[in-house]
Image (cartoon, grey):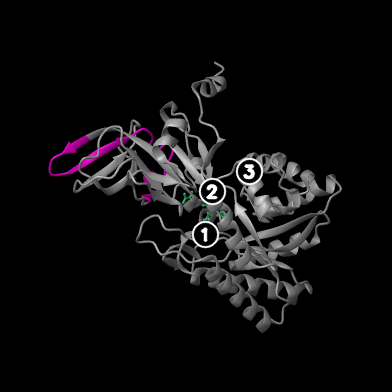
Amino acid sequence: SRTVTRNADGVATVAGIDVKQLAEEFGTPAYFLDEEDFRARCRAWKSAFGEEADVFYAGKAFLSRAIVRWLTEEGLNLDVCSGGELATALDAGMPAERIALHGNNKSTEEITRAVRAGVGRIVVDSFQEIARVAHIAERLGRRQRVQIRVTVGVEAHTHEFIATAHEDQKFGIPLAGGQAAEAVRRALKLDGLELVGIHSHIGSQIFDTSGFEVAAHRVVGLLKQVRDEHGVELPEIDLGGGLGIAYTSEDDPREPQEIAGALREIVERECRAAGLAVPRLSVEPGRAIVGPTAFTLYEVGTVKELPGLRTYVSVDGGMSDNIRTALYDAEYSVALVSRTSTAGPMLSRVVGKHCESGDIVVRDAYLPADVAPGDLLAVPATGAYCRSMASNYNHALRPPVVAVKDGAARVIVRRETEEDLLRLDVG
Ligand code: LLP
């Protein structure tokens, strides 16, 4: 988080509060989220895309009532991908018309709830869903705004993208073979649907804008085909999320302005060339907004030196609060934050307390050689896909999320308790 600094005693402080105080008050492990940083990132995305575009925060990265309120206040829209996320959004007062519902297998119940609530868009993901949403909307006497999610044959991850043949996945309707065009044909015929646009999401943790450019090019190609075939100009394009963030000093993320500029330019140029009115653009960043705004604070429990190999530093959390290292081989950094040390660097592996040797938080890290039980370690950039993917493995209690702002800290998601676990266990 951009506000972490050290005080005179070498203790890290965030938003003016020292981490020892935070650990004492809220316990460890815990996620600390910088509210001002979150809001600043929302504003950066909003202003980069301007009034002619919409920014939908992807709730899957991390969602809570406080997050929904901040988004609402900052003028962002919200992408939800389940009934649970929809319930949180509506409960916290996000206007339904600013919500988009996603998912490759939305239940009838989820669709019904979304249509009833009046969500601004449902992103339909299959032929069956086109019929299903239309049927539900007609029954409710509504005309639901929908976008069709297409796969453009681009898959991007980090620095690379592959521009062919990545239609072999569960999401979206392939442009290839005319399937997406057929989906448009069907959607246009259904009274319950107002087809407003085409959606594409090409991947995650992307640093290179060229994958988005190829996607934009292909989506505009479909808009042109639709215009030529039906005389209809679809007014919206959504190019999804996926912008990468810096997990370690090796990552070099693009700024929102860069991505906004690149996307706008390609969409405008291609539409002009095709004689189409420029559609309203939207994007769905999750990680890029919330990822950098939080860190996880852990306490060291044991330190085990394996001569000639490395030192295992065990903390009081692990794969239950951050599955990303185990699942994706994700890289994180880690710092000793409860004191400074003059000891030399020691190759360490920061591991959790779970019953599994893959329970790694940070695979390779240099920590001071005197790291010891009771030390506090911070792992930055854990705002996205950590609390939202947290589990109760080994009956771990999922950590709280604490918002810090102007020298004050407050819990926005409380720590789970053993009663919470036992309440579900009704056998
Ligand atoms: N829109 C759609 C349709 C998506 O599927 C996703 C992410 C996003 C937006 C937001 O992407 P972002 O800007 O956050 O990259 N659990 C994985 C990431 C899975 C992302 C799934 N979809 C991780 O921890 O890296």
In front: label 2 or label 3: 2
Percent coordinates x, y for residue 292 in the rendering: 47, 53
The disc labelled 1 sits on which kind of residue? Gly
How would you rate the neighbour count of disc 3 (Cα within 10 Å): few for under 14, some for 14-19, many for 20 or more? some
The disc labelled 3 sits on which kind of residue? Ser
How would you rate the neighbour count of disc 2 (Cα within 10 Å): few for under 14, some for 14-19, many for 20 or more? many
Q: Is the residue marked 3 within 8 Å of ligand 1, measured from its CB?
A: no
Q: Is residue 46 left or right of residue 27?
A: right
User: Dot 3 corresponds to which residue?
Assistant: 82
- Can the viewer see residue 170? no
Q: Residue 229 has which mark?
A: none
Q: Is the residue marked 2 within 8 Å of ligand 1, measured from its CB?
A: yes
User: Dot 1 corresponds to which residue?
Assistant: 242
Q: Quadrant of residue 121?
A: bottom right
In the picture, the quarter occupied by the C terminus is top right
Percent coordinates x, y for residue 284 in the rendering: 60, 58
The disc labelled 2 sits on which kind of residue? Ala
User: Dot 2 corresponds to which residue?
Assistant: 61
Percent coordinates x, y for residue 133 in the rendering: 74, 49
- Whole-number angstrom distance, CA of label 1 to CA of label 3: 19 Å
Q: Residue at x 42, y 34 (%)?
A: 23
Q: Earlier in the sequence, mark 1 or mark 2?
A: 2
Q: Is residue 178 left or right of residue 262?
A: right
Between 165 and 90, the one lying in front of the other is 90
Residue 345 versus residue 239 in the image, above or below: above
How would you rate the neighbour count of disc 1 (Cα within 10 Å): few for under 14, some for 14-19, many for 20 or more? many
| Magenta span contains residue 307 | yes
